[in-house]
Amino acid sequence: MAPLLREPELIGYNPAIPIEAFDVIITDECHRSIYNLWAQVLEYFDARLIGLTATPNKQAFGYFNQNLVMEYPHEAAVADGVNVNYDVYRIRTNITEAGSRVDAGYYVEKRDRETRQTRWEELDEDFLYDPNQLDCDVVAPDQIRTIVQTFRDKLFNEIFPGRTEVPKTLIFAKDDNHAETIVAIIREEFGKGNDFAQKITYRTTGANPKDLIKAFRNSYNPRIAVTVDMVATGTDIKPVEIVFFMRAVKSRSFFEQMKGRGVRVIRPDDLQAVTPDAVLKDHFVIVDAVGVCEQDKTDSRPMEKKPSVAFESLLQAIAFGNIEEDVITTVAGRLARMEHRLSEEDERRIHEVSGGLTVRDISHRLVEAVNPDRHLEQARADCGLAPDSEEPVSDEAMQAAAKKMIGEAVAPLHDPALRSLLVEIKEKNEITIDHVSQDQVIEAGFSLDALDRARVVVDSFEKFIEDNRDEITALQILYSKPYRTRLKFEDVRALANAIEQPPYLWSESQLWQAYAALDKSKVKGASGKRILTDLVSLVRFAIQQDNELVPFPERVNANFNTWLASQEKGGRKFTAEQRRWLEMIRDHIAANLSITRDDFEDVPFIQQGGLGQVYEVFGDELDGIIDELGEVLVA
């Protein structure tokens, strides 16, 4: 309680620390450090100020007189390897887009927001709700379940194809009730135990939130963390590869901070320590289930500055004389949120006890009371000046006006009867849970921006091939079909090394997914793991030698089956033991492009079985079979 009751300290002159002590002051996170106490510190010194922030807003620009010295955009940070880029995967459902309706006569569940106690109530009239009420006033479990099921089903074949481990996923929920529901449904749908998904909010369920954050960062579990805003800013969790929005965000800077949880780069070894089947983190995915990436954002600052402090404690602090801006704006924010949940009876009781005020009136007065522009207007009025007067107003007049406005705004909250009523109503408010409505997926896929990026990758790759067709050995061979010489593994490795270098930074997996995003009907094996020789298939598809993009092992297997059929048609029969060895040779060729008599003895599975045993199985035909397979399987 002590921090709430302490008045902000005013900074006066200190001879031990003269105002000229510094030539330059650098303030980090300046979108937060230019207000209140720290603003006094910055303004105390006669020094040049340099502000650093990853999420600049209008207030920050205004404080520094619109003087932008340097900017380092996300695109440049990605190019420099400081950040990773992202794609947006959109999930749209009927209820998310349009809300729903429960007909009269059905029962709905009512849940107390604070105690979580529930009861059932029969509807005597139709109950309609729109998307804005979802997860605030109404919870539709099937809407959440549909989104989670879609995420689960698309995760390993579209969002992160080829993976078997759920990437570290951070989900943003609307409030604590919403977060708990999401966690419960995730545990049910994934069926991987309670440790798999955890809620990390200020309202704990026993575990220390800091311990949960540490485990999310450094341990295998939890794979999925659901939070409201506790992990939204200032928490560095590098292994996060999915940022999942199940809540809307209207503040541009807050959205950028939340999105920034995914941009952090991480060493492959550190990533694999918590996500064993990850190769590296070259991007992250925003899963947008509410259209947050499509909504207009503002530069407003979040009102809640003390989210971990109970509402009753905040009201009591004001009654004891605390007029800190953070306390006042937090109470205003809580009241504004409460306003949307009030019944007519609640509004009547508040109006009666407060002497004619509504919750909106009280909240609005609190916000205006800490607005410097309103202080100036009040000071001018107190000094008898016109509202648009250019005559300067003294600091003393401004301070007196601020004190007057804040005193008038908080005065109703000095009444213990009103404070008790507000606390009672807040605790009484209930959420309606719609167990009746069934949801359906409208769309699940990558956004247009992601498709545009895929198109750029494909176009750049095909231009690279054309520009280097005479410079890179593998491209020379692949362009000269029928091949004048046999393609070697070393040639493909050299091509892979070339495309992995700046400015391209391509991998077989990234190129495969880019083609799949543009035309999935022509791309097979999008959910499988890529191997180096898949680069052969990519080049052949890019230069239109093949009509479909097929994993190289599949193409080799198709050629192998054709060869086997032709052998049998010609009268050559293979025993089961011979076919087993032939299939191992086929798999080796798929991964290494060829096998010749010279390197035959070095093949691991030949060494394990013994070269003599292989000759014993095939006899004098072995040398001819080796040369034949090496030629026809990669044709």
Image (cartoon, rainbow, N blue to C red):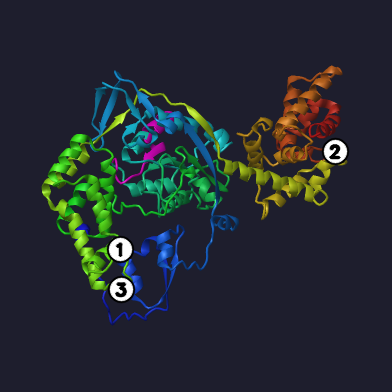
Image: 113 above or below 237: above
Amino acid type indicated by mark 1: Pro
Name which quarter of the figure residue 145 lies in.
Answer: top left
At numbered mark 3, what does the secondary structure look like: helix, strand or loop?
loop
Question: Badge 2 is on which residue?
Answer: 481
Placement of 25 over or under 122, stated as above or below = below
Task: Evaluate whether residue 191 shows in this view.
Answer: no
Q: Amino acid at mark 3?
A: Pro
Nearest to the eye among marks 3 and 2: give it.
3
Looking at the image, residue 110 sits to the left or right of residue 86; the answer is left
From the viewer's perspective, tell me whether residue 600 is left or right of residue 608: right
Task: Label 1: state its secondary structure.
Answer: helix
Of all residues, the one furthest to the right in this rendering is 484
State the mark number for residue 276: none
Q: Label 3 to label 2, Cα distance in Å?
A: 83 Å
In the shown orientation, is residue 510 left or right of residue 305?
right
Magenta segment:
182-205
Q: Nearer the viewer, residue 597 or 619?
A: 597
Does the magenta portion include 586?
no
User: Which residue is under mark 1?
Assistant: 372
Considering depth in this image, is 159 or 398 the residue closer to the camera?
398
Q: Nearer the viewer, residue 105 or 2?
A: 105
Q: Residue at x 20, y 64 (%)?
A: 403
For marks 2 and 1 on the same chain, the one whose residue lies earlier in the sequence: 1
